[in-house]
């Protein structure tokens, strides 16, 4: 294991801080940053990123439940969470299919980067103008399930947890406040990433990776979750919102670089 993996672990830790702080699983940072480092294949990055996100979300949810600080209404969130899990499997199938149709991994990486750029720009525009945009409050279970399915499929295809996008969806479509939405986002992420992992294991499509890298990223995901929860106690809503916007801008910059690298360089 080369020294470059120390940087991978650092990225995983810093990205995992965002889970407790603003509901971002971290994969949306880990995936493009590690892609840009060019230390492992696109499929391996997607798998390890998804694993890190799953571990971080489960760790944070468990800590919240143990401390009595969970604001999640599991019954109300079930249609979204379960459908996102189904969507997660479909998204993984689409990713595998794209990889077989386009064996050039660089092209697959370019497609993922392009989709992430578009989504991040849209969410950033909404976030900066949400005070002037009237949201919805969907209560129909089928409508909730449809949104969860589409979101789960998209995030799984991209190899991310979808945290920043889940947050915008929950605020806009379900009229949730930022802090409850952050916890609900992690709840959804846990469902979709678990389903995606089960599918990957069942189909034998786990890419080659160094076990020590997975262990290191898992440890950093848990550590990031613990430290992130402590930082949250010292931050007000305004600070969390600024961090969220910064994360979106960072995603756009990194994904733009990756798109150029994959498609042009």
Image: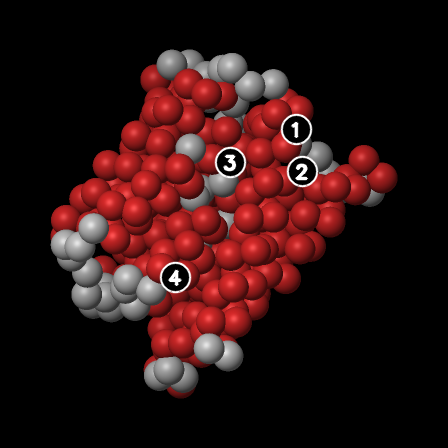
Q: Are marks 2 and 4 in contact (CB under 8 Å)?
A: no
Q: Nearer the viewer, mark 4 or mark 1?
A: 4
Q: Going by the picture, which residue comes out furthest to the right?
A: 132
Pointer 2 or 4: first along the chain: 4
Residue 37 or 117: which is nearer the viewer? 37
Q: Which residue is mark 4?
A: 35
Q: CB under 8 Å between callouts 2 and 1? A: yes
Q: Secondary structure at mark 3?
A: loop
Q: Which mark is residue 140?
A: none
Q: Image check: 155 left or right of 35?
A: right
Left or right: where 91 falls relative to 178 = left
At horizontal 37% and vertical 76% (from top left) the residue drawn is 105
Quick check: marks 1 and 3 in contact, CB under 8 Å? no
Q: Which residue lies under the disc numbered 3?
A: 23
Chain-order first, disc 3 or disc 2: 3
As measured in the structure, the alpha-carbon distance from the residue carrying label 2 to the one carrying label 4 is: 30 Å
Which mark lies nearer to you, 2 or 4? Answer: 4
CA–CA distance between discs 4 and 1?
33 Å
- Judge whether 89 appears above or below 85 on screen: below
Q: CA distance from mark 2 to mark 1?
A: 6 Å
Q: Which residue is mark 2?
A: 171
The tag earlier along the polypeptide, 1 or 3, is 3
Q: Which residue is mark 1?
A: 177
Give the structural element (helix, strand or loop) at label 1. loop
| Towards the viewer: 32 or 183 | 32
Residue at disc 2, secondary structure: helix
The structure residue drawn at horizontal position 79% and vertical position 42%, both measured from the top left corner, is: 129
In front: label 3 or label 4: 4
Residue at the (55%, 19%) spot, across then down: 235
């Amino acid at each position: 294991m080369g020294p470059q993996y120390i940087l991978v672990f650092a990225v995983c830790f810093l990205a995992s801080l965002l889970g407790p702080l603003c509901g971002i699983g971290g994969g949306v940072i880990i995936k493009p940053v590690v892609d840009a480092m060019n230390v492992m294949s696109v499929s391996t990055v997607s798998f390890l990123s998804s694993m890190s996100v799953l571990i971080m979300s489960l760790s944070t949810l468990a800590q919240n439940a143990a401390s009595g600080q969970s604001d999640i209404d599991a019954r109300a969130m079930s249609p979204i969470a379960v459908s996102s899990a189904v969507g997660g499997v479909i998204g993984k199938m689409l990713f595998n299919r794209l990889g077989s149709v386009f064996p050039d991994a660089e092209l697959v990486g370019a497609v993922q980067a392009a989709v992430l750029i578009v989504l991040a720009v849209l969410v950033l525009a909404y976030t900066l103008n949400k005070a002037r945009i009237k949201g919805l409050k969907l209560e129909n279970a089928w409508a909730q399930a449809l949104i969860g399915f589409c979101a789960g499929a998209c995030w799984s295809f991209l190899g991310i947890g979808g945290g920043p996008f889940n947050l915008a969806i929950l605020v806009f479509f379900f009229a949730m406040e930022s802090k409850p939405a952050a916890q609900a986002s992690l709840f959804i992420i846990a469902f979709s990433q678990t389903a995606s992992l089960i599918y990957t294991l069942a189909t034998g499509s786990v890419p080659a990776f160094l076990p020590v890298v997975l262990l290191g990223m898992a440890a950093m995901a848990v550590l990031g979750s613990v430290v992130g929860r402590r930082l949250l106690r010292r931050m007000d809503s305004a600070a969390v919102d600024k961090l969220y916007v910064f994360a979106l801008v960072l995603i756009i910059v990194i994904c733009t670089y990756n798109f150029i690298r994959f498609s042009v360089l």
